[in-house]
Amino acid sequence: MLRGTGLDLESAWCPFRVAMVRLERGVDFHKVILGVPIAALPTVCGELATEPRWRAMLSGLKTVQTQFLQAWMTTTTETLAGMPGMPTAEGFREPFDTWLDMSQLLPHEDWPANVKSVHYFVGALEDSVSPPPGTASEFPQEQRDAVYQGALAFFRSGVTALWPNFDWTKMQAPDTVQGEQRMRSQYWRANVDPSDRYTLSTTGSKFFRLRSDDSGFRNLFLAGDWTLNGLNAGSVEAAVMSGMQACQGISGYPREILGGYAEMTRK
């Protein structure tokens, strides 16, 4: 948020724009690494879709909105869930089908001693009709409000299947805040910006992906988990492998990338 203006410059629906600047190859740059997530590419560099493979990739790779909730608790996971360890749950009920105990992060956060565990809840967020990027809109806030309401509903009923010993008093919040209003002291977000959307690994989608060193445009290299990288799935590991492959295409190093597309070709 730009202080004093109310403008969120990181939002695709911020109307603020700057003047365009033209850069020339050989004068202003030599090589370009494009690391923008794929859902934002039609807006950022839609002209590349004149190339058939780019057109196929932009239409063939699917993305989805996601939602996230981070909750701090004043009791341990073992007490909440009635089991030892640091569980991870996948394929749970909507709207948060994934739960991760991330309490190992607490030593790096500035919380009072009564905070005993921290938890991440993640899930897909149903797509809805949104205004075109670049137009002033309440859409991001509306989606964030929807995530909050979904989180309330989830903790009213669904979370008890994971945490049979949960009640609102165990959620970190000021002492003066009672009941479900304690949710206001947690962190939640709606990942609705094109650059925030999650790239899906649908059936056959790997055939639409381009390699980091085979963009179809001279001096243009690609980086991101949406490229053909060996994992071909939305993850930090795939993004790192893609970045290594872009480096390999530019400089020849690293000479070998374990799990990369060179190994896929050999198999």
Image (cartoon, rainbow, N blue to C red):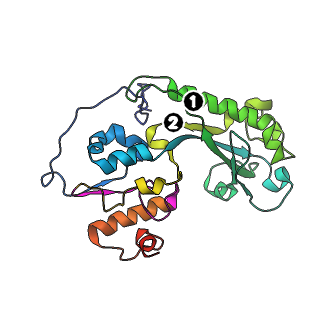
Front residue of 117/120: it is: 120
What residue sits 30% from the left and 67% below the top? 249
First-in-chain label (2 vs 1): 1
What residue sits 17% from the left and 41% below the top? 22
The residues colored magenta run 218-237
User: What SS does tag 2 mark?
Assistant: loop
Q: Is residue 176 visible?
A: no
Please tell me how crowded label 2 is: few (under 14), some (14-19), or many (20+) other residues with Cα within 10 Å.
Answer: many
Q: Is residue 61 magenta?
A: no
What residue sits 23% from the left and 32% below the top? 19
* Percent coordinates x, y for residue 247 in the rendering: 33, 66
Q: Which mark is residue 198?
A: none
User: Is residue 91 rendered to the left or right of residue 252?
Assistant: right
Q: Amino acid at mark 2?
A: Val
Q: Which residue is mark 2?
A: 192
User: What SS does tag 1 mark?
Assistant: helix
**Magenta part, dominant SS:** loop
* Cβ–Cβ under 8 Å for marks 2 and 1: yes
Quadrant occupied by the N terminus: top left
User: Is residue 54 rendered to the left or right of residue 108?
Assistant: left
Please tell me how crowded label 1 is: few (under 14), some (14-19), or many (20+) other residues with Cα within 10 Å.
Answer: many
Q: Amino acid at mark 1?
A: Gln
How many marks on residues? 2
Q: Which residue is mark 1?
A: 143
Q: Is residue 221 magenta?
A: yes
* Percent coordinates x, y for residue 54 in the rendering: 33, 48
* Percent coordinates x, y for residue 32 in the rendering: 26, 55
* Percent coordinates x, y for residue 204 in the rendering: 49, 54
Q: Is residue 13 above or below residue 77?
A: above
Q: Is residue 79 above or below residue 59?
A: below
